[in-house]
Amino acid sequence: MPVIRDICLKLKTDEVLRREGFREFSQIRSELKSLINELLTRVESTRLLEPAVAYEYYTVTGMSPDQVSLEVDKVIRGSLLPSVFPGAREQAIAVCTIGPGLEKQVTAYTREGDTLRGMLLDGIGSAAVDMLNQEACRSIAGEASSRGYQASSPVNPGMPGLPITEQWNLLELAGAEKIGVSLTSSGVMVPRKSTSMVISMGPQMRTWTQAEVCARCNLRETCPYRISS
């Protein structure tokens, strides 16, 4: 089960502001932008980000309406993959994390009463996970191309047709323990700034932009993180 660690994440102020729920970037006070830039510098100088991706590829051996069967007698339960990617030949399972360092600093700021820095640093962490997910998708798409396949857009546990309970399964399939990612008994990922995903590989896989995902989401009218086309 491969692991990628040498990942450079260069975050921009606008990406952080979007993750904080700000829509009109030009109207944000210069003091706030300066504070974000200060925090971005601190994140880089103190190495609060420890990005890592654990992943594995599995050959698809069969499909039914409610699950995908993989080699080594493994399955991914749910109707999403069979219905949207019926032609998949392989499934790439990945877990991404930025590590525990940033989360610990957010907690420290909060305990010190510096809630603004804590909130902004948390937004930096969320933006970093977004960027790490994109890097993981690009890496998997390159591997798919080398095998003569296309890579689909990623799907995540909790999406309709991919139960959140599959989180345990995906972490095991990806080898998440190699990058220090685990789940609590209630299903919360540790470190908290971590994600899991499934990418289907095969001929003519379906893809969509983030704006299209947001347009289909039930929270599209109220979500502060939505992206418009």
Image (cartoon, rainbow, N blue to C red):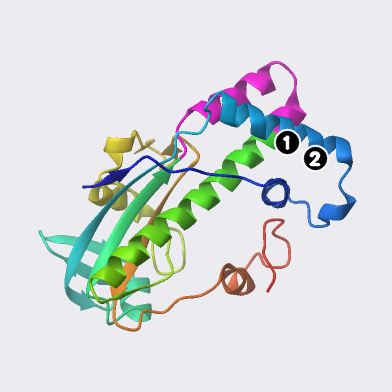
Residue 81 sits in which quadrant? bottom left
On the rendered image, what quadrant is the C terminus found in?
A: bottom right
Residue 191 x/y as whole percent: 45, 34
Q: Residues within 10 Å of mark 1 (few under 14, many from 20)?
A: some
Q: Secondary structure at mark 2?
A: helix
146 lies above or below 122:
below
Q: How many marks?
A: 2
Residue neighbourhood size for the residue with mark 2, other residues' Cα within 10 Å, grouped as few (<14), some (14–19), many (≥20): some
The Cα–Cα distance between marks 1 and 2, rounded to whole angstroms, is: 6 Å
Residue 33, numbered label: 2
Q: Which mark is residue 134?
A: none
Q: Which residue is mark 1?
A: 37
* Magenta residues, start to end: 98-119
Residue 207 lies, with reference to residue 193, above or below; the image says below
Q: Residue at x 64, y 27 (%)?
A: 42
CB within 8 Å, label 1 to label 2: yes
Image coords of residue 96 (percent x, y) = 41, 46
Question: Which percent across, then down, holds residue 11?
Answer: 61, 45
Residue at point 52%, 46% (across, down): 129
Residue at x-position 89% and y-position 42%: 29
In the image, 143 versus 152, the foreground residue is 143
The residue nearer to you, when weighing 220 against 9, is 9
Q: Is residue 197 above or below residue 115?
A: below
Residue 113 lies in magenta, yes or no? Answer: yes
Looking at numbered disc 2 in the image, what kind of residue is underneath it?
A: Lys
The image quarter in which residue 149 lies? bottom left
**x and y, in percent, of residue 17 in the image:** 73, 48
Residue lying at the far left of the rendered structure: 72
| 69 displayed left or right of 222 | left
Q: Identify the amino acid type marked 1.
A: Asn
